Image (tube, helix red, strand yellow):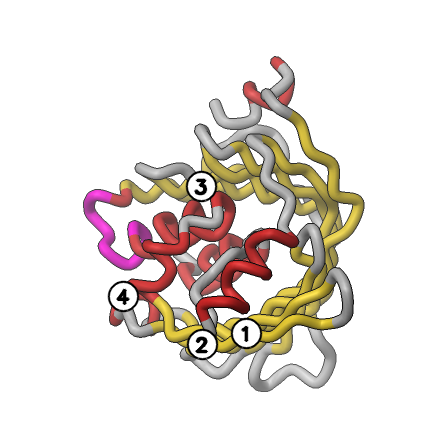
Amino acid sequence: MKRRSFCAAALGVAAAGVRAADGTVLGQVRQRLADAPVLKGTFEQRKSVKGFRNPLVSRGDFLVARDRGVVWATREPFASALIVTRDRLLSRQADGTVNTQVDASHEPGIRAVNEMLFALMSANLAVLSARFEVDGSLVGKEGWRLVLKPRDAALAQWVTRIELDGDRFVRKVRFAEAAGDSSEILLAGHTTAQALTPDDAARFD
């Protein structure tokens, strides 16, 4: 199982509201973020892997439902989907075949990543403060920038640093993996909703 790739994808769809070095900055960053039960958009990920000259590029879309989980659907260069919930991490091929399924109750590292992802998406400041050392600043009238360094040992096995840039939504995520690889993910086309459509709900099954 390519655990680091799964964790990278999970981190890539993060939206943030976290404890910055200054409590006032924290509150201001949180106020700038959109808060909705359902968030959708598109992504482009450029992953730099040790030993490869050119980055690996993938594109697709993501779906975040606060009460259900996250679907990270890659469309290019080949179709696949990563489904993350509070209790499991599931990798599925384009034909619906399950590639990998991990029960979070048996994998402390996966549980830590899942909990972090939900905390990011729901702006749960208490959870993030416990897992990360965070430095933050405001950028202009609408923007913000955050740097997260894990203090949680389970998370530190996968990622050493996360940088987030955004406004009402996260626009760019850069992260360095413990194995030495790194990624930059651009998020765009954000839309929000108060509830999942039947089709979107079915993506979690």
Check disc 2 and report the residue beneath it.
Answer: 21
Check disc 4 and report the residue beneath it.
Answer: 154
Calculate the distance from the C-alpha at mark 4 to the C-alpha at mark 2. 23 Å
Check disc 1 and report the residue beneath it.
Answer: 136
Calculate the distance from the C-alpha at mark 1 to the C-alpha at mark 3. 27 Å
Q: Residue at x 65, y 71 (%)?
A: 138
Dot 1 and dot 2 residues touching (CB under 8 Å): yes
Q: Please tell me whether mark 2 sits on a helix, a strand or a loop.
A: loop
Tell me if residue 120 comes above or below residue 150 in the rendering.
above
Tell me if residue 192 comes above or below residue 33 in the rendering.
above
Dot 3 and dot 4 residues touching (CB under 8 Å): no
Mark 2: amino acid: Ala
What are the residue bounds of the magenta stretch?
105-111
Mark whose residue sits in front, 4 or 2: 2
Mark 4: amino acid: Ala
User: Camera-side residue: 152 or 92?
Assistant: 152
Mark 3: amino acid: Val
Decide which of tag 3 and tag 4 comes sooner along the chain: 3
Q: Residues within 10 Å of mark 2 (few under 14, many from 20)?
A: some
Decide which of tag 1 and tag 2 comes sooner along the chain: 2
Q: Quadrant of the N terminus?
A: bottom left
Residue 182, image x and y in percent? 57, 76
